[in-house]
Amino acid sequence: MTAKGKIYLIPMVIAEDTLQQVIPKQVLLALKDIQFFLVENPRTARRYLSGLKIYDSIETLSFQVLDKETKASELKVLMTPVLKGNNVGVISESGCPGVADPGSMAVRFAHQNGIAVVPLVGPSSILLALMASGLNGQSFAFHGYLPVDAKEAAKAIKEFERESIDKNQTQLFIETPYRNNKVLDHLLGSLKPTSILSIALDITGKSEFIQTKTVRDWKLNKPSLPKEPAIFSFLAF
């Protein structure tokens, strides 16, 4: 019986032109022996691997799409290489696969089928934002995106604020860059003045911005946020 390969969770950069600063040597060493990849976006993955300059040719590599549209029933076919004994790398569109990312489907399949999973160190905007926020890092919850509708967003924020008070828990959100200012409006309009809000933009990038203030203080000098990847987090008392 052929021994199964391993699933390697390959971190992706979260800001432009940061390959040399944020991707550890351990990742480069692991990648040299991987020819098969499950990726959220083949174009992004090819550009990333090409930039690492560890392969003689990117054309010899195999890329299969694993994204939010992938069905659980498709995983066995996608996992054929690892079931045949090949190591397979999972690459997200940004950051660490499996964290707020469809790569978790591959990880779940691996555990269900006796396939070893190897997570590799790399940048996570969620963790880096929490580290730099000064908010509670022992109890926190990541909620993904807030509702687009203003009323629904306000309702969700108030519910999460109550949860933050009850549990002394930091609440984190991510947002599409073009909606940064709209989300900031929702947060400043719905949170209590004493709640502490942290905004982290373009983490690890050239225009990195991380500041934590009370909602009251943010309102006194409300910024116009650029269209950069953002993490918002708050803690209420």
Image (cartoon, rainbow, N blue to C red):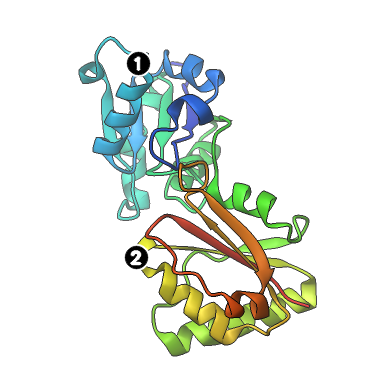
- Is 178 rendered above or below residue 19? below
Are circles 1 and 2 on residues that touch, CB within 8 Å? no
Q: Picture quarter containing residue 215?
A: bottom right
- Nearer to us in this view, 204 or 61: 204
| Residue matched to label 2 | 178
Disc 2 marks which amino acid? Tyr
Which residue lies at the image location 47% right of the left edge and 18% below the top edge? 28
Find the residue positioned furthest to the left: 59
Q: Quadrant of residue 15?
A: top left
Q: Quadrant of the N terminus?
A: top left
Q: Residue furthest top?
A: 56
Answer with left or right where residue 38 lies relative to residue 122.
Answer: left
Q: Report the residue at 44% width, 36% height from top.
A: 12
> Which residue is disc 1 drawn over?
53
The image shows a total of numbered marks equal to 2
Measuring from the top left, give residue 203's x and y in whole percent.
52, 47
SS for dot 2: helix
Q: Earlier in the sequence, mark 1 or mark 2?
A: 1
Q: Residues within 10 Å of mark 1 (few under 14, many from 20)?
A: few
